[in-house]
Amino acid sequence: MNIALVTGSAGLIGSESAAFLSDKFDLVVGIDNNLRQYFFGKDGNTEWNRNRLEESLPNYKHYSVDIREASQLEPIFKEYGSDIKIIVHTAAQPSHDWAAKEPFTDFGVNATGTLNLLEMTRLHAPEAVFIFTSTNKVYGDNPNYLPLVELETRWEIDESHPYFKDGIDEKHSIDHTKHSVFGASKVAADIMVQEYGRYFGLKTGIFRGGCLTGPNHSGAQLHGFLAYLMKCAITGNHYTIFGYKGKQVRDNIHSHDLVNMFWHFYQNPRPGEVYNAGGGRFANCSMLEAITLCEKITGNKMNFSYSETNRIGDHIWYISDLNKFKSHYPGWNWEYGLEETLVQIHDGIASRLAGSAI
């Protein structure tokens, strides 16, 4: 039997991974205990997405266990063992604001949970490909010290800088900078996944995501930028822009395009390799530009205000350079542009609101 194991399987990237892999493996094992609801309240509840997977994927099997507890993971790994061919680890505490409230919880989920999964893989499924969703926050505040220029609707990097053409590459330093508590816990996990590839020889791959987005995101104020923004545009709920005049720039990658990156890596893994993963120059926007798009798609004027206080660890301008991944896997490319993704997010949220799923 060939098995795919997905952590955070009821979340955005986890559920996309489960659906993507379901016709490629005999069984998809999902691990998710809906801790996102604990982090973000009812907006973060992923129960609807778990139900959707169980109803739509006949070969999906769900386990509501806590990755912080190796004792809860070990029976699953012992049961399936070497039949596990791929592990897509997306479970995380994903907010730098929330992490400061409970550093033990944040580090437990992001760092200890990742170590538990790596060790279970080494002991019970050493031939499996291990995919880790890291984050651009491992670079800390370093991107904010690039030569940035203020334009009418966005910050942009100076045209003379090497990053102007394609964005920030993997050689950008992750050291000597403030990360936020969340960024630090993800650095610990990121480095450990690299080490299990380089030291133990596991087939690990690290994907440092920009803004990961798509129609199945349980967006909340503290995490899920485009999904939460669109939800506010639809409902009329108030939205707050935090700092940088609303001109801070993010690149945005559709969940399908990211999981397709995972699939390309799985077919030809490079142990311990690190890749930036985002929308790049293909799909990016500032907060102000995203608000304009949401208003265009919904036909509603957004109810928002501005706070001068920026979030700690927030990037002013971040666009991912994907040239390294593209050079290693030339068959991959983006499929979903920014406006198309936002339309999908709109339709998904509107449908769930109509059915009172969120």
Image (cartoon, rainbow, N blue to C red):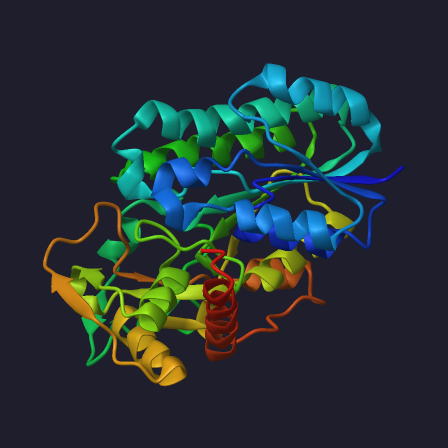
Residue occupying image coordinates x 40% and y 82%:
297
Location of residue 324 in the rendering, given as x and y in whole percent from the top left corner: 57, 58
Residue occupying image coordinates x 53% and y 38%:
91
**Quadrant housing residue 128:** top right
**Quadrant housing residue 226:** bottom left
Residue occupying image coordinates x 28% and y 55%:
315
Work out whether 334 lies above or below 60: below
Work out whether 158 lies above or below 191: below
User: Which corner quadrant holds the N terminus?
Assistant: top right
335 or 141: nearer the viewer: 335
User: Residue farthest to the top?
Assistant: 71
Location of residue 7 in the rendering, given as x and y in whole percent from the top left corner: 60, 38
Residue occupying image coordinates x 37% and y 38%:
39
Location of residue 191 in the rendering, given as x and y in whole percent from the top left corner: 49, 33
**Residue 197 placement, left or right of 78:** left
Work out whether 77 lies above or below 155: above
So how many labels did they put on this image? 0
For residue 174, say whether it is visible.
Answer: no
